[in-house]
Image (cartoon, rainbow, N blue to C red):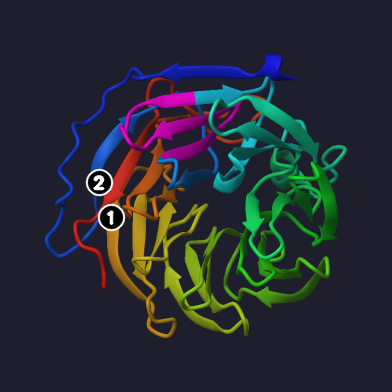
Amino acid sequence: MKGLLVAIAAASIAGAVAAPVPDGTHPDGRYSIVDRIAGPDGMWDYAAVDAGARRLYLSQTSHISMLNLADGHTWTQVGLPAAMWHGVVALEAKGVFLGANGQSHAVTVFDADNHALLREIPTSTGPRSDLSGKMAAFAVLADPDALVVEPKSGLVVAVNGGSGEISLIDIEANAVVGTVPVGGKLEFAVADGGGLLYVNVQTAHEIAVVDVAMRKVVRRIGLRGCVEPKGLAYDPSTGLLIAGCDNGVAKFVIAKSGREVASRKIGDGADAVIVDERRHRAFVPSAADGMLRVFDIRDADQIRLVQTLATERGVRLGAVDPTTGRLYLPAARLGPPIAPYPWPSAVPGTFHLLVVASSATPP
């Protein structure tokens, strides 16, 4: 198995890189693009930051790319032949990171230090989907899709977008220990830390609430006026769920009650909602208009749009470093789809990360 591992380390990836701007961006704490970091070619999906290891993980088609945040330019890649990576998550205490391989329908465990492939945990025997059209094409290549850790149980949750179910994985036992049928085309999921998991159901325009211990859906939160919720985030200080909808709306909902407290306009094609808990900010990057919306979320009943920042068209995903508050947004010049993938391609030599930062930290 280890013989299949592809490891590529590069201190510099070819491509134009703008010179970094000093950390002082705006005296009023507004966000700006402070750096552009060239990186490996390829389209991208989910990203995650391991703050302790000072490392950014990014799924890029057949590889998982890792950026050394300490020096800000060194990339390393691992991959498997014919892989299709989606979710990625680091388990710092266990010294591993995981990738969701939609092609092999498994979660793959890598050593965080030497990047060796340790094992693969099948989440299904293959894509099982009642979806049709565009949805079916996406689902076949994204099963499993998102990954999230459920803190109370310690289980890793794999969201199987095509089969409409979630797999509960015990990493120590190297096995799926439970499966919860949800139904529909599933997107991102978040955990509240108390044993509940919230899952965006794209085709039903709702959030399904899963009790992990009970292994079942306990309620559903309808998202009125939301078409195809994709990105989802949870803010523990306010108990807010924030869903990014494909029709250019962000829904702010109290997780415990399901009460909607705000509906705010965003751009079309948002695929992620990113929360900086420490600074009480929520970020929604929208692909269609190339804009990043920044919301103040310190008060659940007074959600404020504090800034709209121009990024680039196609920017729709990313991750925040909880230590520095810096936001990392993948970007590239986009080309037509390349079979068998139904999504746009990244023009070779144009991939880069936009680094967004503020000089001021909200109290």
Residue extending farthest to the top is 3
| Residue 8 visible in the displayed image | yes
The one of 163 and 35 positioned closer to us in this rendering: 35
**Tag 1 secondary structure:** strand
Q: How far apart are the alpha carbons under marks 2 and 1?
A: 9 Å
Report which quarter residue 353 is drawn in. top left
Query: Residue, x 84% and y 60% (percent of image)?
Result: 181
- Asked if the residue at tag 1 contacts the one at tag 2, i.e. Cβ–Cβ closer than 8 Å, the answer is yes
Q: Earlier in the sequence, mark 2 or mark 1?
A: 2
Q: Nearer the viewer, residue 93 or 274?
A: 93
Expressed as whole percent of the image width and height from the top left, the position of residue 172 reads 75, 45
- The residue at which mark 2 appears reads as 33
Position of 274 compared to 230: left or right?
A: left
Res 309 label: 1
The residue lying toward the viewer, choosing from 195 and 309, is: 195
Residue at 71 percent across and 47 percent down: it is 135
Which residue shows up at 77% across the image and 49% down it? 170
